[in-house]
Image: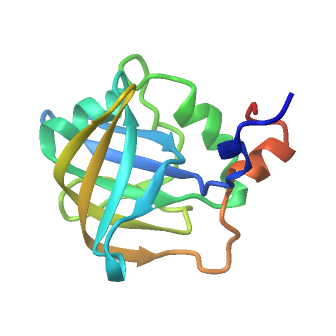
Amino acid sequence: MAKKLLKFKNYDVHSITTIGATGVLNANIATWVMQVAMGGKMLCVALYKIDYTLELVQQTGILNVNLLAEDQTRLIARLGRKSGRQTDKLKTVPYATDERGCPYLTEAIGYAQCRVVSYTDAGDHLLVVCEVLAQTVLHADKNVLTNNFLREKGLVRG
């Protein structure tokens, strides 16, 4: 049986970090992130509709897109396979907060500070279109974590 075409795509792996209206912090894993305007001025992030991170983003309209590095594979289980509704996902993850109080991962390659400008329905996900307010490179020497790398290490299916 032939593979589906999109299985051939090698997506970069990100963590979306955010702060809710009550100050609660959360993070998840996202591979469907893309630049949607010249010069890196806009990003689109696909967030699963039942995801707690999306709920918090909708409360405040802010998030950070963290580009993960190959040495951060442990975050797949920590941030991607648990809900922030029941656990403090950032409890054992190195992070800091920006001037908005929004967390970013200090061991990531870097992060983009974003402000939500619109939402679009996309089936089981919601597309979150964001204005990029600032971009910060933290570790330019690290290798970008990709979905293919995770498959090769047996950390994801497909």
Give the residue displayed 45% in from the left and 54% down from the top: 33
Position of the N terminus by quadrant? top right
Give the residue displayed 18% in from the left and 37% down from the top: 58
Please say if 139 is above or below 74. Answer: below
Q: Residue 44 at what x, y percent from top left?
A: 34, 55
Please say if 15 is above or below 113. Answer: above
Please say if 152 is above or below 43. Answer: above
Q: Residue 122 at what x, y percent from top left?
A: 34, 35
Give the residue displayed 54% in from the left and 62% down from the top: 108
Q: Is residue 12 visible?
A: yes
Q: Is residue 20 visible?
A: no
- Towards the viewer: 28 or 98: 28
- Towards the viewer: 146 or 111: 146
Position of the C terminus by quadrant? top right
Q: Is residue 11 left or right of residue 4?
A: left
Q: Is residue 88 left or right of residue 153?
A: left
- Towards the viewer: 59 or 6: 6
Residue at the top extreme of this rendering: 86
